[in-house]
Every structure is written in structure tokens, then in C-alpha cells.
Amino acid sequence: MRTSHASAALALLLVAASQSGCPVHEETGEAVFDRTKLHTIAITVDEAHLEQLATDLEDRVPCTLTYDGEVIEGAGIRQKGNDIKDLEKKPSFSVKIDQFDEQAELDGVKKLLLNSAKQDSSFLREQIGGDMHERAGVPAARTAHAVLSLNGVDKGIYVVTEAIDKRFLRRHFGEKNDEGALYEGPCCGDFVDDLGAAELDGGEDPGAAALRALADAIRDTPDEALAAKVSEHLDLDRFITSFALEALLGHWDGYAYRANNYYLYENPVDGRFVFLPHGMDRILDDPRFDTETAPVAVLPRRIREIPALDARFRAELDRLASAAWDEGAALAAIDRAAQVINTASAGEETREDLVEFNANAGPLRDALTLRRALIDPAIVCGDGDVGGLETCDDGNTAAGDGCSAACRVEP
């Protein structure tokens, strides 16, 4: 067991090891997000700070974090989310490992999100969604599972989630490309309508000039020039991929359908913004979610309204249904997680979570299988057969005769 106070000595040892030719462990967070084990997390907060932890969503209080036996002094903790939860229950937490000791880190990680999974009793939706995004080439946060205690009291099973921060950005965009402006979109507002709906979370963007330029392009550009103009400020291809993934996963709580749970990163490589997903704990709530559901956010709505862009969206749906929707990999991930999570043997809260997990893992498997059948690219609109998400199919794709061009019953 080592503490963060030993980091200077550890650095010297690593240098010596590298000079001697011995292998050096690179601190990448892989140990923190190792899915082959059920991690143990113990958080200790001094009695004097418990009232603030119970009532303040903004400011962190000092804590000691013990992660798989490694003790980190000088961390800071606050509740995570939009609503305060009673500490006697099961809040989610955000832990900044170097809050009060800038040298502290955990296998290269500086911040952890500890999600109670109260909205996802399978504890797996974030992982399934993240894996599919990664297969599609869209960066997503890593996750793992842990049993957590607060001041010695068992709080149950948590989803340990990687923070979208500088370390995440370096991993996905390159070591020198972590200085762009990073915005977080909390629930529920579209930055296109209100720049204040996206909060600066890192980097610099004086006057939000770049974000304003993107919003103006999305809102004010005529249809025929939208793709070219928006592409000057945004990686539009990657956005269409993200939008299609939200539709395929039934991610009704994301950017397209609720203007929620998104990050915008101004990539220094080309100065364009990239959308990054998070908060995928409600995906596949409804495996019959209609990919024709009207978006709430302005950009995806305009994409669906412009025939050329809508065709790109539909083509991406078909591509991802084959390229990213790896049902075998998803089902195998659920099986592996079941083996790991069922090793838990802590207190009453953990035992209750185990009951919830085992009751919901099967239905999640069923939802994945059903969803794959419904979005199968082999289902052809206009072939005369009603299949998948179609509500009608009269043998053509012309609108105005009772069936829409997307094989939905016309209003």
C-alpha cells in the first residue's frame, strides 16, 4: 500500500528502472478501469465536513480515498448530479483526486465519477453504450464496477466512470492536443438556442467566440449550404455518427432527443468541435425506440429535414448496425460482468444491489437481442413486408399514400 506522498520517490524509482532496462508501468488508468475484477473503494470524510457533503453540489470537501488498497490523501469529494441525496441512502459522487494535493493521482487518473446506478439496475448500460461508441470510432469514457463504503458504511455496487478531462483528451486526441475549450451540456438545453446551456469545463475560449460561431452556423445557414458551413466549425461526419448511435441505442436522454448529456471539445488539431457522449445509463430503456423519433436539438433536427443530410444519417444507421452493433461482444461483456459483480460479498446495500443486478441482466440481454432484430439493415423499406421498426410497408417509398418514405404510417 502506498500513498500519494510517495510520488516523488516513486518517480525516482521509475527513472532508475527505465535506465536499468527494467519494464516500467505506464500509468494509463488501465488498473483503475480493469473490468476483470470487482474493485473496492473506501472513502473517509471527516465528521466536520459531512454536512457540506450532504447539502452542497458545488464545492468539494476533503476525503481520503482508498482504491484497491492504494491510499490517496488530499482528494476532494462532492455529490454528483442535479439533486442532493441523503447520505444515508446511495448518492453518486465525483472525486477529484488531486483537489488538495496537486501531486496526487491514481494510476494516472486525476478524477473519478462514482455512479450509484439508481437509474440502471443492470449497472451495464453505460458500458454497453461506451463500447459501441468506441467500435464506431467515437471516444467514450471507460467504466468498471466497484463496491464502495463511506466512513465504513457499505453503500453498495457503483459504476466507476472515467471523467472527460485533460487525460481523457490526451488519450483520444494526442498528447499535445488537450488544450482546446471543453464544454459540458447539463440537462437540458441546446447551446444553439442559448450559449449559456453549455458550460466551460476546461481550456480557454474568450467570449465563447468559437462556440458562438458554431451555433450561428447551425441556426442561420440556409439548407443548401449547411453541411459545408457547419463543417468549418464541427466534425460533421463524426457528429452524424454520434447522432445515429443515439438513435440506434434509443439514447433518449442524450443530445439529439433531450439536449442533455453531451460534451463539446474544440480539437486543437483543426480548430473544429467534436461531440462526446456521456450519461448513457438509460440506453435501451425501450428496445422499440423509433429511429424516426423527431430530435429536440437544432442540428439533428435540421439534418433530418434536409434530404441530402438525412440520406447520410440513414446510411450511417445501416453501417453502424453492422459495424458497431456487435451483439456477441455485448452479450459476452454482460456475462463477464456477471461473473465479476457476483463476487461481491459486502453489506446489506451490496446484497440488495446484487439482487437488482441479477434481476435486470437478463432483460438487458433480451433488449439487446430484440433491438438488433429491429434495426437489422436487411429490413428494406418498400419491399412490401412490414418488419423491424416499420409500421407499414405498401411496396414503395413514396409519401402521400398512407405510408411515409420511412415506412411509418402517415399521420
Image: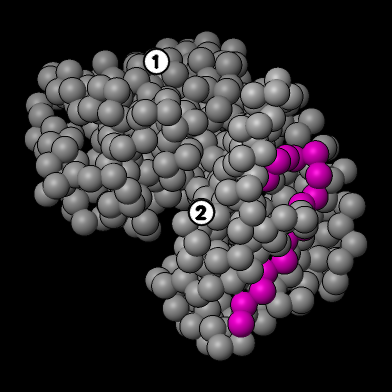
**In the displayed structure, does residue 297 sit left or right of residue 8?**
left
Residues 43 and 131: in front is 43
- Quick one: SS at disc 2? loop
Q: Amino acid at mark 1?
A: Thr
User: In the rendering, at what x and y percent does residue 110 appear?
Assistant: 52, 50
Q: Is residue 263 left or right of residue 376?
A: left
Q: Quadrant of the C terminus?
A: top left
Above or below — where is 311 with respect to 330?
A: above
Looking at the image, residue 266 sits to the left or right of residue 224; the answer is right
Crowding around mark 2 (Cα neighbors within 10 Å: few <14, some 14 to 19, many 20+) is some
97 in relation to 43, above or below: above
Residue 180 appears in the rendering: yes
- Residue carrying label 2: 103
Give the SS element for disc 1.
loop
Characterize the magenta stretch by its predominant secondary structure: loop
Let me know if residue 36 is in the magenta part: yes
Lower sequence index among marks 2 and 1: 2
The residue carrying mark 1 is 397
Asked if the residues shown at circle 2 and circle 1 are in contact, with their CB atoms under 8 angstroms apart, the answer is no
Q: What residue range appears in magenta? A: 31-46
Q: Nearer the viewer, residue 222 or 135?
A: 135
Which residue is found at the position 31% from the left and 37% from the top?
A: 179
In the picture, the quarter occupied by the N terminus is: bottom right
Q: Is residue 263 left or right of residue 332?
A: left
Q: Quadrant of residue 209?
A: top left
- Nearest the eye: 263 or 215: 263
- Residue, x 39% and y 15% (percent of image)? 397
Please state the horizontal and vertical placement of residue 160, each as a whole percent of the image.
64, 52
153 vs 136, nearest the viewer: 153
Question: Magenta span has 343?
Answer: no
> What percent of the width, then of the height, locates residue 346?
86, 66
Can residue 321 be seen here? The reply is no
